[in-house]
Image (cartoon, grey):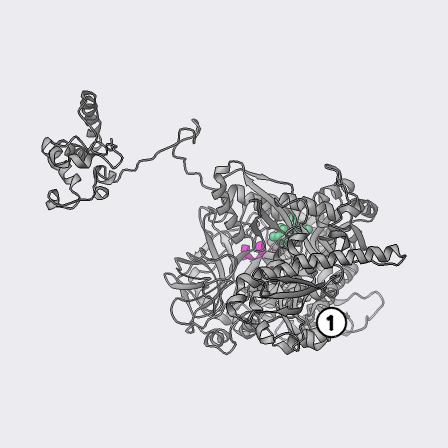
Amino acid sequence: MTQRGYRAPSARFWGEMEDELYDEFGNYVGPGLADSSDEEENEDEEEEDMDDFGEGASRAGHEGDGGEGELALMGTNGGAGSSSIVLHEDKKYYPEMEEVYPGVNTVVLDEDAQGLDEPIIQPIRPKKFSTLLAEKELPTTRYTPEFLTTLMETPTLLRNVCVMGALHHGKTLLMDLLIQQTQEAPWDPAKEVRYTDTRKDEQERALSIKSTPVSLVLEDTRGKSFLLNLLDTPGMANFSDEVSAALRACDGALLVVDAVEGVMMQTERLIKRALQEQLPIVLVLNKVDRLILELKLPPADAYYKLKHTIEEVNACIERHTPNALVKRPKRISPELGNVAFASAIHGWCFSLGSFATLYASYHNLTSSFDPAEFAKRLWGNAYFDESTRSFRKKPPHPEADRSFVQFILEPLYKIYSHTLGEDAPELTAVLRELGVRVRREDLHLDPKPLLKLVLSKFFGPATGLVDMLAKHVPSPVAAAVAKVELLYMGAQDSEAAVAMKRCDPRGPLMLHVVKLYSAPDGESFQAFGRVYSGTVSTGQSVRVLGEAYTLEDEEDMAVREVTGLSVGQGRYRLEVSRARPGNWVLLEGVDGPINKTATLTEARGNDEAAIFRPLTFDVAPVLKLAVEPLNPAELPKMVEALRKIRKSYPAAQTKVEESGEHVVLGTGELYLDCIMHDLRHLHANLEVKVADPVVSFCETVRETSSLRCFAETPNKQNQLHMIAEPLEAGLARDIEAGAVSTDWDRRAVGDFFHAKYGWDLLTARNIWAFGPDKQGPNVLINDTMPSEVDQRLLDGVKDSIVQGFQWGCREGPLCDEPIRNVKFKILDATIATEPVHRGGGQIIPTARRVAYSAFLLATPQLMEPYFKVEVQCPADCVDAIHLVLQRRRGHVKEDRPKPGTPFYTVEAFLPAIDSFGFETDLRAYTQGQAFCTQVFDHWKEVPGDPLDRGVVLHPLEPAPINSLARDFMVKTRRRKGLSEDVMISKYFDAELLQSLANQQAEAAAAEMGGMNGGGAGGGYY
Ligand SMILES: Nc1nc2c(ncn2[C@@H]2O[C@H](COP(=O)(O)OP(=O)(O)OP(=O)(O)O)[C@@H](O)[C@H]2O)c(=O)[nH]1
Ligand SMILES: [Mg+2]
């Protein structure tokens, strides 16, 4: 039908255009021949059809009937076109479809592309993976949104807090307790709402996966309102990356600890992390009800258990305070006001201060009673002497209870026992005495909701928690200087830095995006960030500076318009038109160029702005999963979804191996499971094939290179000599943790290495680079003698050598895995004097080759990641745990009873590659009584020699322990599509091969002569 506008030209036209009807090959290219009678018939039919398309379309169709229409088509050069010369290729033989049928699209479908049962146009299926924005009606809060936005403009009344804690210690329910207080409608006491677990899979698994921001207006004990920006983070060790991102945006950390389980491995890691970010920590001892109902501890013992847990936290803080330079963190203790007690499940939370106020109002005490003074005497060795009606440090009589037990725990125990143990009429009397009003029908509720109802009414809103945050977490204004000094990479005296330190809303816009939240449809992302200076508003254009942006290299920069601004409220967003310094906002429209974190600044001006430090994580993504779409045609869709996965999971990485295999790297099994869920359902609706999970490896050396290696550039004008040797223990970790940086002054770097690792100062000052990246765990040193090598020439090619070294470190020679823990020393160099002979093209590959040969002659080894495992179990399961660990090459570091509980804690190390299915195994062996946490801890050499060709590997059989290195290496190479074995000669110059052969011959001769000897590289040649 689209050709309908075209018909045989008139006879007049034939004469003029005859020559033009055939192309240079003699093919007819003229207009279609419409002279058959069939066509005429068809035309009639079509005309009928056309009527349906309306007047415009039929007119276009009829145009072809008249001569004018064709003339207009053929003469493309306009009205006078008939006499002008028109080139063959410029002629327009057919009308454009748009001219004939304006607004109509032609869809050409391959016959087999779609099944018969599939509709051509798919119905829109809304994705239901999120409860976010799914609420039909937004809840009414006890304050107006305007009040909240007013508080947003008053940074001194703001507190940005990260709620963190080990798995299932009750963070989300604690958030529920606070959120519930801000909403008008009462919540069903029998239900665990988990308001901040917004994803469906979080609800189903009863576990938080993503952090969720909530902004609440809450009152302290004196009735003063604060705007608390709280981030509920996941406690699962796999998702520690979420906590790292969250801590970036906060000024304090609210640590939630289970009163029974106490400090766990993950709690300690979180404390360490918060201290690294220099944040004050406040503590909530949650699940206090478990001491009463589960462990049934007498009140005096419950006090000791609580005290012990607080001391555990203090010991952790003490242990992980970074160094003497940082202000000593404050101890935490209830009488200082930075500890609160709670049972989130039963809806209560108090601090000593708020309890004292409650006590005063309950007993109608007069103004002469000072709750603050009373609160100070409610902890520690304080006893109330009835006879003198005063507090003493010593017990007035041997049975006397501490004030905490007497005034707090005993009444609490009584409320629990009355609520659970009494019938409705007696309970009503008790409740009346307590001043708690409960509806008659509620008295017959199940114990859990009844307890929640009674206790939440008795304790009232969690004002103690607000007091604690208001007093011990600085406001964004107070925290600004420390935060900017720690995070901002630009000059501290620049205009932007000064404005940020003052939280100046009129300064240049500086906003740190720390995380991206996927929209419920999985298509776009909202960027979550904190405003440091300036004001961001909807519709504003901003420059998005990526993690690779520097003032010298501006490539990672884009300009975007902020299309929407909102404040997170758990399940809904509160739209705002602008945000000032100190606030958290969710921005729409800017996520496109952002990969993980970003810095947003003015679109124009503020050209000197630098970026905020990219995130670092205390977990490494060492588990690998190769993914492939079931339908190969869906590869682009999968690649796009993988890009979104990288955005949504802070520590996740994806890469394409040489074999074309797409690999996702994550921190643990659950992490990868969540990624796969999102990949399959949220970000793309496709089926994905997954290979068996594997782990990343590293390559390292055990000895110093047996020969001084050298390599010549292809043009034979330059030569580099290098050796490799292992780094001192602990140095790689120090570099990765940022304890030393090549950005420092040379002297400072030298002093660090000299003081801590005993390097001689000259060598230490000649450190050129770390690799594979800026804080990578390998070192390149210029160890040439100034008397032998022209340092000026060498400096001229420094960048190229560093690039070659870093490239080499990124993909080691054994199986393309990163090199770790190796010191490369340049011993000698001959550099061409002519610049054209020493370009990057010559030097870079040569530097890499010489690094590889030095590496291969230094007894190369494979390294594998090890997990630290913490298992909590009853004492009789400990033996079973030893057994499970042993079968997986794991070993127990320590097992010890948990004070105040019937549990044992087992700490162990387990190779990550043998950790798949460990948890299931553990459950099976302990009848589900053991609970474990696994988290990446360190790299360790794999037993065996990876280059030992004598090892015979039997397919489908586990390799013996001493052949593991070879087994892992060969399998990794196969998977990556590399040749089966390392081609050593590829990295060696002929001359070097010769010296190696000589060395081997000498070693053999020495051996024959009864002497001990043998070069380290002998076996590989
Ligand atoms: N007995 C008791 N159980 C609690 C309390 N608070 C939470 N729980 C239970 O602990 C489990 C975990 O609660 P969540 O609030 O999801 O804990 P979480 O810390 O948010 O968990 P993750 O985010 O997955 O780390 C749930 O089964 C709750 O019922 C409490 O105060 N007392
Ligand atoms: Mg949670």
Is residue 179 shown in magenta? yes
Q: How many marks?
A: 1
Q: Position of residue 246 (x, y in %)?
A: 57, 60
Q: In the displayed structure, would residue 991 be above or below residue 221?
A: above
Does the image show residue 293? yes
Q: Position of residue 935 (x, y in %)?
A: 69, 54
Q: Position of residue 335 (x, y in %)?
A: 69, 70
- Magenta segment: 173-181
Q: Which residue is mark 1?
A: 757
Is residue 6 shown in magenta? no
140 with respect to 906 (left or right)? left
Does the image show residue 772? no
Mark 1 CB in 8 Å range of ligand 1? no
Quarter holding residue 462? bottom right
The amino acid type found where label 1 is placed reads Tyr
Mark 1, Cα crowd under 10 Å, few <14 / some 14-19 / many 20+, is some
Kindly state the secondary structure of the residue where label 1 is placed.
helix
Residue closer to the observer: 254 or 383: 254
Would you say the magenta stretch is mainly helix, strand or loop?
A: helix
